[in-house]
Structure formats: C-alpha cells, structure tokens
Image (cartoon, rainbow, N blue to C red):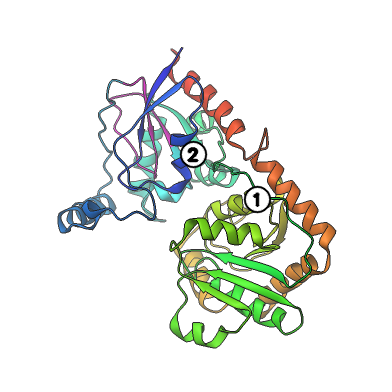
Amino acid sequence: MTIKVFLRLGRRPHQAYYSLIDCPPKGIDFVYDKIIRYPEVDTEIQSRFHKFKVSLFEFVTKHYPVPLHIDPRGCDLIYSTNGMILDNSSHWVISVEDFFSLTRYLYTSQKHLHFVTKSLEHKNCRRILPWSDASYYSLINSTKSKIIEEKSVVSYTVKETTKIEQKKKRKDKLGLVFGARNFYHKGGIAALKVFDRLNKKYDVTLDFWGDVPEHLLKKYSNENVTFHLPGSDQSGFFKSYQKADIFLYPTNLDSYGLVILDSYNAQTPVVSSNVFGLKELVEKGKGGLLVNHPARSHDENYLTSPERIERALKFCMNPSESFLNDVYDKTEELILNSKLRRRLGKNGRDAVTGSGIFSVKTRNEKIKKIFEDAVSPS
C-alpha cells in the first residue's frame, strides 16, 4: 500500500527536510509545492509583496494565534514542518523542532500555549514528531497533556550521507573547522578565541565558515586561519569537514545542530556544548566530546524563559573564561590523542550510515510506521 502525504514545506524549507524529498521511505509518496533550496536565490521571497505577507502573518499570529489551512491535494495525510499548526479540516502530523517554535517564541503567552495544546490534542492531529528527546520534553513539560504525550514519537532529523575518502594520518598541521551562519549564537567568538590560544602552542590550522564581524576579522587573521563566507561554497564546506581533524562547534543557542551530522558524515570528531538536542547527537552518536555550557537557554526540563534567553544572548557576545578553558581542554585532548580522534570519527560515521541511529534508513523505517499508524482508523 502506498500512502500519499502532502509535505507542507514552505517556499524555502529548512535543510532538515531535504533528505525526506531526496530519500523518501518506500511506500510513501510525498507531494509538495515548488521549493527553493539554500543557497539559491528566490526572487519571489525577496519581493516586497511577499515580505509584506510574511510580516502581516507574523504580526497577526503574535497577537492572535491562528491555524494554517492547507489543501491536502487529495493526499491521505498532511505532514507540516517549520512549526506550522494546521486547522483540523484534514488528518495531519507535525514535526516539532522545540515547543517554543510552535508559539512563535512567545515564552510567556498563555494564549499561545492554550492554542497549541488544543490544536495538538485534536483528533485530526494524528501524530507529533519531536526532532529529539529534548524537543519531546520541552513539548510535554510545557503542555502537561497526556493526549499530546501519547501522540508524540521522537523522530531524529537526519541528512543524506555521501561517500568519503578515508582519513589519512597527518604529516603536516592538524586542521580544525568551524561552520555556522549565525556568528555569535553558534559560538563563533569562542571558536576564534580558543583557536588563537591553540595556535600559540600547536601546529594547527582553522577553516572558518561564517560571517565574521570586521573588527574580529582583523584581530584574528593570520596565516593559519582561512575565512569563508557562509553559504558561498557548499561543496567546499563539506570538503573542509572531510579535510579537518576536528570540528570545533562551541555553540550557545541551538536546538539540534545539523552541522554535527555533517561532521559525522565526514568522519570528523566534534567538540561542542551540551545545549538542547546537541547533547543527544554527541552522546548517542558517540562522535565527539561535550563541554558544559554555563548559560544554557533552557533548564533541566528543557523549558526556557525570557530571562534565560537574555542571559544566553549576553553570553554569546562575551563567553566566560571557564567555558573557553573547557573548550580549549577538550580540543587539546583530541589534538594530542590521534586514536581518540579516529575512534570518535568512526563512531560518528557509523551513526549516520547503514542502520545507525541518525541514518536515513532508520529514519525512514520509523517515519513509515508513524504514517501508517496515522492513517489507520482509531
């Protein structure tokens, strides 16, 4: 039996959903509208009329939450992405990055909390797919709904893998790589500060993919650092991963960290921080070392608040010395231990290939079962 699913992606979907389009589960026929993939330019998105529509939608939904009506195109089910709550005229499932993406990041709005809870509890919302355990707990602990808890099934967001060349033993400088589009949020300043220290002690290089502020570009430029604009060369970005010995990613504000899966694909071990879903990617994938983040935007129940967000934002601009020291120590541990680098790199690659926990195969098997359950009579 083939199940037809309308995949509601939006004009420019999150890269997290590319592998659904390119590697769908057997027996699932995805139907979707035209999309523009990053980093392609979409002239419609850049038009004044489109920007006006988006601004109007954001203004309205921040003051009065409303569901989105989607024509199912004759499909058995709608799969909604990007935190878009649908009306209940058709059967639908929804992917959830974290609970607060559903409330438009209005952390204290009881009106939005009530709207999300009632919408997800409705019988036509058949299943809820949190991206991670962290996402699951943020949803359950926010709504406190047994109905939502019973509908929720964690489905790890994955990326398609590519063939790689086996890493060779280094005879020259060890290579580090950093990559992110939001410089401060993703730990860009911490990465530069830590590398600056390492560079004074070890023979290392850094490929830095990010939009670096001009004053920091001048401060940290040297012969061992190569700066690239984010999105300027996607194939070059992955080659940097594969060439590197360590992926340095001391992120501050993050929900999942797809770049870690890119690093695993390249068989490159990661040093990252234990924020939200990234903790699971590193611990369950066993492909890197974690640093405790002292200013996480969430508590132990994966709930957040404006105060926590404000503290995390301040930390982004000025990370503490203790955090920088911890990132330095973990990175140094990998620099000095080639066996550990190889073991973690292999673990990461195993996690995203074959039947690994973050593989397309594992995702497809799980999501097919979820869709089958969603369309069956209950």
Residue drawn at (51%, 56%), measured in percent from left and top?
235
Residue drawn at (60%, 43%), measured in percent from left and top?
133
For residue 20, above or below residue 215:
above
Dot 2 lies on which element? helix
Majority SS type along the magenta span: loop
Residue occupied by mark 1: 264
Please indicate, yes or no, whether residue 251 appears anywhere in the rendered image. Answer: no
The circle on residue 206 is none
Return the residue found at the far left. Answer: 49
Q: Do the residues labelled 2 and 1 touch (CB within 8 Å)?
A: no
Ranked by sequence position, the earlier of labels 2 and 1 is 2
Q: What stretch is highlighted in magenta?
A: 75-94
Residue 146 picture location, percent across and down:
52, 31
Q: What residue type is labelled 1?
A: Tyr
Question: Front-most of 266 and 33?
Answer: 266
Residue drawn at (70%, 57%), measured in percent from left and top?
269
Dot 1 lies on which element? helix
Residue 331 picture location, percent across and down:
73, 68
For residue 63, above or below residue 3:
below
Q: Which amino acid does label 2 sit on?
A: Ser
Find out whether residue 186 is within the magenta segment: no
Question: Front-most of 216 and 280?
Answer: 216
Question: Front-most of 196 and 324?
Answer: 196
The circle on residue 19 is 2
Kindly indicate the quadrant of the structure image that contains residue 92: top left
Question: Front-most of 201 and 289?
Answer: 201
Please indicate, yes or no, whether residue 121 appears anywhere in the rendered image. Answer: yes
Residue 76 picture location, percent across and down:
36, 19
Residue 61 picture location, percent across and down:
26, 49
Pointer 1: residues within 10 angstroms few (<14), some, or many (20+)?
A: many
Q: Distance between the residues labelled 2 and 1?
A: 16 Å
